[in-house]
Image (cartoon, helix red, strand yellow):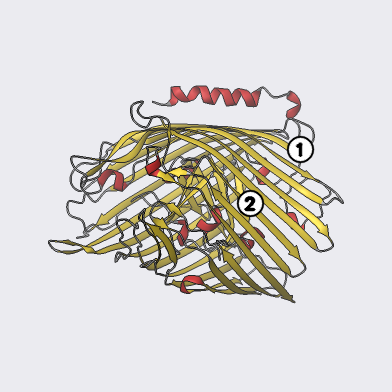
Amino acid sequence: MIKRKFAFDGICNSFFGFSAILWLGLAMPCSSFAQTDSVKKAKELNEVSIRAVKLGKRQLSASPLQILSGKDLERISSLSVADAIRFFSGVQLKDYGGIGGLKTINVRSMGTNHTAVFYDGVQLGNAQNGQVDLGKFSLDNIEEIELYNGQKSNIFQSARGFASGSSVYLNARQPEFEKGQYNHIRAAVKTGSFGLINPTLLWQHKISEKVSASVSTEYKNANGRYKFHYTNGVYDSVFVRKNADIETMRIEAGLNGKLPDSSAWTAKVYFYKDKQGLPGAIVNSVYDFTQRLWNENFFAQTTYKKEAGRYNLMVAAKFANDYSRYLNPDYVKEDGLLNNVYKQREFYLSLANRYKINSFWDVVLSGDYQRNTLDANLERFPYPTRNTLLTAVASQIHFNRIDIQANLLNTYVNDKVEQYYSAGNKQMLSPTVMVSWQPFNPKEFRIRSFYKNIFRMPTFNDLYYTQIGNTFLRPEYTKQYDLGFTYIRAFENKLLQQISVQTDAYYNTVKDKIVAVPGANLFRWSMQNIGRVEIKGLDVNVQTAWKIAGDLLLNTGLTYTYQQALNVTDVKLNYRNQIPYIPLNSGTFLLGADWKNFAMNYSYIYTGQRYDQSANNANNYVPAWYTHDIAFHYTRIMGRQRFRLSAEVNNLLNQYYDVITNFPMPGRSYRFTLAYSY
């Protein structure tokens, strides 16, 4: 019964990587230390008549940055944030199939829990299992998605922003009004395969010259039924996926304002609710499942930013309350069916201070406090409480042609439980160094590099899950090394208008990887630190913009990833085998075309062969898969009113494949969208 109420070594090993990158930055020619030029944000490729190169934050970032925003998000055949993130390089999306299946992200093979997800600058937490289901977040109210390897290339951020191996930033649409405008409305309805009905509504209102409000709502219902192939080695049959239905509702409201002293503030309230079936793994000729899941997620957050001369202040606060219920009618206990209920609560407070010592040197001191609790109706449950205190000291030296950033993060974690044993206290220091350098006078080409030492704490499930958790677990430690370059070139009065290239080579290690291992029998497992992983990779991103003739514009995007993620735990057991579900080769291709009121987008996603177990043998082999998606759009503008009609075909060639073994993905599907905005 849920009973509790919510109340409120590694430094020496890091020195070599720190010194090497710092030397790389300091050994540049002295001519780099020139007066900083003004840099304007790059516009959309297909909207710019380019006369000079304009560097955006993708080119200037000292850490690898990938962005999908604006028209890019409208073009791609994506229903959720998870669908969009598939087009980033170096990313594996774990998809358990269907419109409501769990979708989590794994960046550069370090594991899902090493990627933090931020919504409007504040992290989305899940202390229970550390995973954020990106399938829950619709693109309807998202203006931009950013993926940073390492961390955001801006030292003026919360301490939480320094505390993960990679970060995804979801930025909601912000109200912008022209003179005389007081309201914006965007309404859309999507329908298509799987019985999908998905209406959305966004209303933005200008309350005064200094204050605006927005409300976004969404409803989604789908039966989730789709055909899939299954073979038992003798017969190959076609079945219909069942128990994949989902019904969701989301509503969020926000306020944005400015004070007379030019400081800015925001406030947001978010509520999400769903009920869904859980389609299980297709094994032993079992196709029907009865498990059900209910989720309710609520959070309220606020931010405040103030600039006073050389001093900047940023404050953020958040309260979150999450509820989930899992029902398994097939599992009968002495006191009835398996019916587990979990309640998580989180309180978060962040304070960041920046002081500009002079025109080229900034320093930052950030501090975060976070309190998490987990309640459950399980027997022998310890009811854990975690208090986390993060403190980050950061410095940035920035000139015209070189930018050097360094920070040191101190993490203190205290776990308490109401019964049994807790993990106690843990305290660690984590350094990061980042360098971005323009070696030549033309500013099109820049070199970047970073070193980051970070770790991830075991989750509540890792430590305290009944009969499985292990309170003696150590954190997972990672070291990340990255060296890459960016290049952008514009051409005037040419067929090729612009080309942008990003390439990064990286080397990561994961120590004390947390894995589940069997105990005395196959029905009793436990969490242990036994893993070591060595990761070598290469990411390539190429974007181009073309003007064919008259009003016909083309843009392309190409990504390629090579990843060798090897298990180096034990020379006697699967040594230097590729870890599960990581392909050696993967990539995507995007082609967009605009002609007057018409637009077309084609996308191709390829994932190479993989293995679903640690042993790389024929029994664990997972074949490569690829999908072709195509979408057509028609837009009509009448004054301030905009109508948009879209038709999409996903998995055009009707390929049957599994992202996760025995969780079949849908074949060919269709989706139609009618959108109106004012």
Q: Is residue 456 visible?
A: yes
Q: Quadrant of the N terminus?
A: bottom left
Residue at point 42% right, 38% down?
579
**First reached walking from the N terminus: tag 2 or tag 1:** 1
Residue at point 34% right, 39% down?
514
Q: How dense is the environment of label 2, judged by Cα within 10 Å: few (below 14), some, or many (20 and up)?
A: some
Q: Position of residue 233 (x, y in %)?
A: 36, 53
Secondary structure of the residue carrying tag 2 is: strand
- Camera-near label (2 vs 1) is 2
Question: Residue 250 vs residue 38: left or right?
Answer: left
The total number of labels drawn is 2
Q: Quadrant of the C terminus?
A: bottom right
Q: Position of residue 447 (x, y in %)?
A: 67, 33
Question: Residue 547 vs residue 274: left or right?
Answer: right
Q: Amino acid at mark 2?
A: Phe
Question: Which residue reaches farthest left?
Answer: 334
Residue 443: numbered disc: 1
Vertical placement of 184 versus 665: above or below?
Answer: below
Pick the residue in front: 356 or 631: 631
Vertical placement of 38 versus 225: above or below?
Answer: above
Q: Amino acid at mark 1?
A: Lys
Residue 589: numbered disc: 2
